[in-house]
Image (spheres, rainbow, N blue to C red):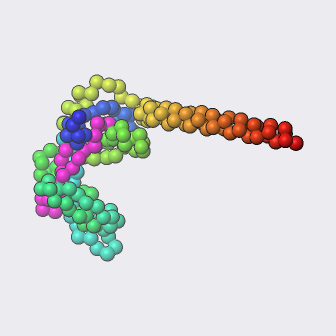
Amino acid sequence: MPAILDQPLKVVALVEFNKSQALVFNRMPSYKYTIDGNLMWAKDGPFYSCFEYDKPSKNWQAFAGRKFDLDMLDGSVTKCEGQWWDGGIGRLSEKLGFHLNSITIGTVDRLIECYVFMGTSGNIEDIHNMVSEYKGVVYPYWDYEKIIKFDKMRKESFKKQLKLESANKALIAEVKVKSALLAELDKAN
């Protein structure tokens, strides 16, 4: 089986989201960035991620100064420590020659863990092509959460049931032992 990042991005569900739709994919976009002037950007399928450089000050830092690493296309890693801001998507759109739209996405695994979709940017034409290949239904927002979490809840319920049955058997065995001891004590008195 190929690694999940080797699999092409594919729409696996559409979910009503506000007055639009959220797209559920088989995997999240995986980005490897390149620096172009004061833009750092990456692409995976129709999706784009972009950061814009601005020198941090003592009181003003990107992501409140949170430190994180971004993998680069050349194999290196850029250490972000307040200097790379989430932005520049308009400038990247101009550079690429087409408009990048905001897209609401998620994956089944992430949504099971936390039912919160995320936003990213993408080429809307490519997104429409991917959506046109999807042959399923458009799920109502809260119904989709129930559907994806049902198996996990059923498995957890089954595990709890087995644990309770095991505990019940152990309790019955313990009661039998205690009853036998009480019977012996009664005979002794």
Q: Nearer the viewer, residue 79 or 171?
A: 171
Q: In this rendering, does residue 122 appear at all?
A: no
Determine the residue located farthest toward the bottom in the rendered image. Answer: 58
In x, y percent, where is residue 163? Answer: 56, 37
Residue at 44 percent across and 32 percent down: it is 151
- Is residue 184 placed above or below 34 in the rendered structure? above
Q: Determine if the magenta segment contains residue 86.
A: no
Quadrant position of the N terminus in the picture? top left
- Who is closer to the viewer here, 172 or 115? 172
Residue 38 among magenta residues = yes
Q: Is residue 142 left or right of residue 75?
A: right
Q: Nearer the viewer, residue 98 or 148?
A: 148
- Residue in view at x 63 percent, y 34 percent: 169
Q: What residue lies at 25% left-to-right and 31% top-to-bottom?
A: 131
| Quarter of the rendering occupied by the C terminus | top right
Indicate whether 102 appears above or below 56.
above
Residue drawn at the location 28% of the way across and 43% of the way down: 28
Q: Position of residue 113 (x, y in %)?
A: 42, 43
| Residue 15 locus on image (x, y percent) | 37, 34
Counting from the top left corner in percent of width and height, residue 87 is at: 24, 57
Q: Which residues are magenta?
A: 24-44
Q: Is residue 89 left or right of residue 106?
A: left
The answer to whether 18 appears left or right of 91 in the picture is right
Determine if residue 95 is in view.
yes
